[in-house]
Image: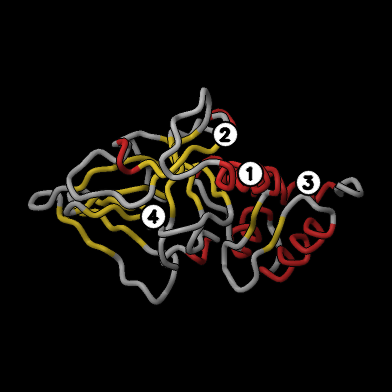
Amino acid sequence: MSRPLTARQQNVYDFIVKTMNELGYPPTRAEIAKALGFRSPNAAEEHLRALERKGVIRIIRNTSRGIRLPSQEPQDALNSATAALPANVEKPSAGLPIIGEVAAGSPILAAEHIDRYCPLPAEYFTPKADYLLRVRGLSMKDIGILDGDLLAVHRTERVRDGQIVVARLDDEVTVKRFQRRGNQVMLLAENADFAPIEIDLRSQTLDIEGVGVGVIRGGNGQALG
């Protein structure tokens, strides 16, 4: 950070961090404006640009939730790991498995799904990550989860409305925002080009493989999501 934050900039930054820790994705400009009492999203945008100039956030253009915390984007560590390790590498003493294509009906952490390991500690993320999942497609682009990214996932079946989840539906694994009303679950994309996935738990099976706790920009090869 080149210069200290003003009190208002610190409020914006703290709200971004709080939202990302609680929900797994950043707030929109409108949500920042509402939470902090700004008159319009444009005021929030001005503070975001100031935070970007000071190096504490990175803005992904043309996405409604395109805010990144550089401290949560360990790209150098990831690049060195993926460059150094072949696809059939043995597990190192520490590191997170990178999951590629998941075969229908098989556990997500089955050995055949693990492409390689990234030498990042699980505790780098909060809550701790259990694996990194390659993202395929742009269904979540409006919150800055892009094709080829690696989604850090905390394994749990307990989720709250609004969280980003890794869900298994009819033997397919997908990354979406979770919303539940009684027996009805909606898996929501963050891209207007994608329709919600509607699930009736009385007649369909939905398994939650975990919740997203962070994103690593980039990744290579085929992806999931």
Which residue is drawn at the image coordinates 44% and 68% (left, top)? 138
Residue at mark 2 to residue at mark 3: CA–CA distance: 32 Å
User: If you read the primary sequence from the N terminus, does the residue marked by circle 1 or circle 3 appear first?
Assistant: 3
| Disc on res. 177 | 4
User: If you read the primary sequence from the N terminus, does the residue marked by circle 1 or circle 4 appear first?
Assistant: 1
Residue type highlighted by circle 3 = Gln
In this rendered view, identify the residue nearer to me: 70 or 93: 93
Residue type highlighted by circle 1 = Ser
Q: Secondary structure at mark 2?
A: loop
Residue at mark 2 to residue at mark 4: CA–CA distance: 28 Å
Q: Is residue 225 above or below residue 79?
A: below
User: If you read the primary sequence from the N terminus, does the residue marked by circle 2 or circle 3 appear first?
Assistant: 3
Q: In this image, 205 relative to 22: left or right?
A: left
Residue pointed to by mark 2: 119
Which percent across, then down, holds residue 222? 41, 59
Residue at mark 4 to residue at mark 3: CA–CA distance: 28 Å
Residue pointed to by mark 1: 80
Which percent across, then down, holds residue 33? 66, 61
Residue type highlighted by circle 4 = Arg
* Rendered image quadrant of residue 110: top left
